[in-house]
Amino acid sequence: MKNTPAMTPELIAQHGLKPDEYQRILTLIGREPTLTELGIFSAMWNEHCSYKSSRLHLRGLPTKAPWVIQGPGENAGVIDIGDGLACVFKMESHNHPSYIEPYQGATTGVGGILRDVFTMGARPIATLNALRFGSPDHPKTRHLVSGVVAGIGGYGNSFGVPTVGGQMGFHSRYDGNILVNAMAVGIAKSDEIFYAKATGVGNPIVYLGSKTGRDGIHGATMASAAFDDSADEKRPTVQVGDPFAEKLLLEACLELMKTGSVIAIQDMGAAGLTSSAVEMGAKGDLGIELDLDKIPCREEGMTAYEMMLSESQERMLMVLDPAKEKQAEAIFIKWGLDFAIVGKTTDTLRFVVKHQGEVMADLPIKELGDEAPLYDRPYVETPKRPVLEAANIPSPVSNREALLKLIGSPDLASKRWVWEQYDHLILGNTVQQPGGDAAVVRVGEGPRGLALTSDVTPRYCDADPFEGGKQAVAEAYRNIIAVGGTPKAITDNLNFGNPERPEYMGQLVYCIRGLGEACKVLDFPVVSGNVSLYNETNGRGILPTPTIGGVGVLDDVAKSMSLAFKAEDEAVILIGETTGWLGSSSWLAEIAGREEGAPPPVDLVMEKLIGELVHGLIKDGLVTAVHDLSDGGLAVGLAEMAMAGGIGATIAAMPFGLPAHAELFGEDQARYLATVGSKDALDEISRRVSAIVATGEALVLMTVLGKTGGKTLTLPGEAPISLAELEQAHENWLPAYMAGEL
Amino acid sequence: MKSAVITFPGSNREGDVIRALRRATGHEPVSIWHQDMDLPKGTDLVVLPGGFSYGDYLRCGAIASRAPVMDAVRAHAAKGGLVLGICNGFQILVESGLLPGVLMRNAGLKFICKMQHLKVGRTDTSFTSAYTEGQIIKVAIAHGEGNYVADADTIARLEGENRVAFRYCTADGDTKAGNPNGSLNDIAGIYSERLNVLGMMPHPENLIETLVGGIDGRGLFESLSAFRGAA
């Protein structure tokens, strides 16, 4: 093997490898690596691919339940949803590329996660996303919002999958590192799931899809480092998306899978050909030999190094049943895609790469993954913040004014401007559109369906990573409950700063503990996920943001529940306890201009008890509208229900004995608003609540707040607010901001 | 009613329109691949579905209009056979010369997906007999290039010959205020001279059941279902 250029400390550092990591390579292979080999190690051992800082802590997450078919470790998680069907889903970040080149960064984020799902044999039926941008005042924010939203739409709309939900928030801590987390959800028959594990010696390895170019080389390494002022110079590491090629790849792959010729399949995502080949071999205890002369290339003269590290999109690698080679090739020719036999499985447990008659790499395949560094990085716990007393935080404005300001604030304003750029109706199964608690999507001809949501409250995670981690999972659970779903499993996308700083590492560790705790108590396991670290610019990290993608099942989508008020003169009830918790609330940040105080604690046992109660109320038809309470508390929840239904409400004086602004805007957890259409139903709900209290398990509270009716929302002691005024405040901010009017 | 739905590489609403036709007519439409040279014998209706044929690269509908199957579609239309082009299908029809005009980028330069009201034009066609003239219906739109533009003579001719099938409007029927994309004369769909070819940007195929947005799109498929062959 040629050993040029010589290994130098600079070259090693350019590959993102620390001196001790390089030493580990020397020990492992007993010689200096070739340049191609160094590239392979850099691709496999970066943070993005190896989870070297997070692996130790992720082990503690609950990943099992009787309905889990496949937990973390494959392309996506798989759960059984009944009727012989499985739901395949995962969320993944594309943060670093989207900051450098927002349109292409976002498109390839969506493309990558869709591939993860259809690689497993599932047809994608929905996507969601979670976006975080810097302060609206930051000069780059508008450009980034515009590019990312156009990119997500540009890819999903063309590919032909509805984008049904998501979240979008702004904070100055994301000024230099935006977050683009995309989630894809697909459906497959539960006994026809495809995996990455190769079997059989001498089987052909087939390359499918688009040609390999020089784009995205070192993308995963770039995504494993912090930014400085030269971030824009990293543009060449961003890949370019082609949704048309992806749509063809989807159809060709699903058609091919039906023929029974696919033994193993893996998409080429981060670290491209390297990672996909190593993963298939290592999982199957087999060696892999690649002949790079056979790789379909977009340009001439590509080196082995470039081919192994390219992150060109819309490519797959597959181990094929040799008896069905011709049949498989015909399918790919029909769809106009490249199909090339580029290697074979071997019994040597070596990863051998040949190019122009020379061996460019010869490495132990299992160790490339298994021997990746594993760090127990030092961490410190975020100091606890004091619990704020509502009585000590006077409201600077009237509650009426505060509500109008809150529902028009960047985080709580309507995101219609965003989701109207996404095709959310294609496939004709979107029962509940974006804008509700969770999206509801019918599966095929029904009646079964899925409830889908993405959630996290970064300011809580920053204030208290453990409670914030719990809250992210609890909110996803609550959103699924609110539409009538049974929460089944989550995917987690952990976005954090530099793990080499103990305070940021501490955020990661405690958030993981918090979400693990919530998953355990709520019986809501993690089945897939992704970790994005080094979201930091010039030493300042993002708010800790463990985005949770939740999936629930509805037995009959026709019975799904929505938040809109349905009729006049219905009782408005609140289920759950109100203590007026203003610490780290939206009200405190937007109205009082303070980001401080402990966030609301999450009582997980109460969360489950109330969740199950509300689930039963929906199932038995006792409630007519349901909305979970989160940012902005009770008042914002009421306003959202009124606007969605075009019906107002009058709220009588509240019985909590707290300052009015704390009652209206406090963010106590485990609470739902609902409407009830008859006295009998109300009596039955009271009876069920009393029955829980009688068990002595918990003190569940149910309060009648007022009733629906008219075209205004009237809060206690305040002048009525017309629905038109609410809507104007809610709908105007984002379009006006994007038009440069603000 | 025998229908055929053409799939081009990049079509993505073929399944939606097949479902709508199946429910309205009780017959399973035949799927035709873009490289097929012929339509099945006895085909009454050919549908060009929504999507991004050939990725919408070059220009929306431009490459698809030159696909092998399009000669058969042109021949079918010339014989008086029914052709329905929805969204990308409309773009293909104008690129094929089966309908006049062009579809430019939306005036707001953004892709728009939302519920949209339409005012139904004449109802003495095979596509709209189940509606009443001037009826306001609510269907979906989902496009980035739906801004219908033609020269003044063409517009005058379309209007003079009563060939505007649907116009965008608000819930109250205000066409100007309800125009989402800048189309001239608020045009959402047009007929060919002989009224056997309809191109429209909105998606009636996504509004066929109460559970999913409403049933205002059903009328189009019910009209087609009532079709009893060319007189």
Image: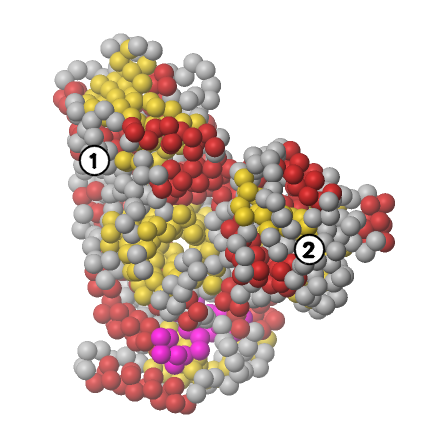
Q: Amino acid at mark 1?
A: Lys
Q: Is residue A70 above or below residue A274?
A: below
Q: Are marks 2 and 1 on the same chain?
A: no
Which residue is located at x 17 percent, y 15 percent? Answer: A31
Q: Is residue A619 magenta?
A: yes
Please state which of residues A244 and A648 is positioned toward the viewer in this rendering.
A244
**Up-down relation of residue A12 to residue A612 (above or below):** above
* Left-right relation of A376 to A445: left
Q: Which residues are magenta?
A: A618-643
Which residue corresponds to the image point at 41% horizontal and 58% vertical from the top-left?
A443
- Please provide percent x and percent y for residue A337: 46, 30
Label 2 SS: loop
Q: In the rendered structure, does residue A24 fall within the stretch colored magenta?
A: no
Q: Which mark is residue B229?
A: 2
Q: For the residue marked with disc 2, what is the amino acid?
A: Gly
In what quadrant of the picture does the N terminus of chain A appear?
top left
Q: How many marks?
A: 2
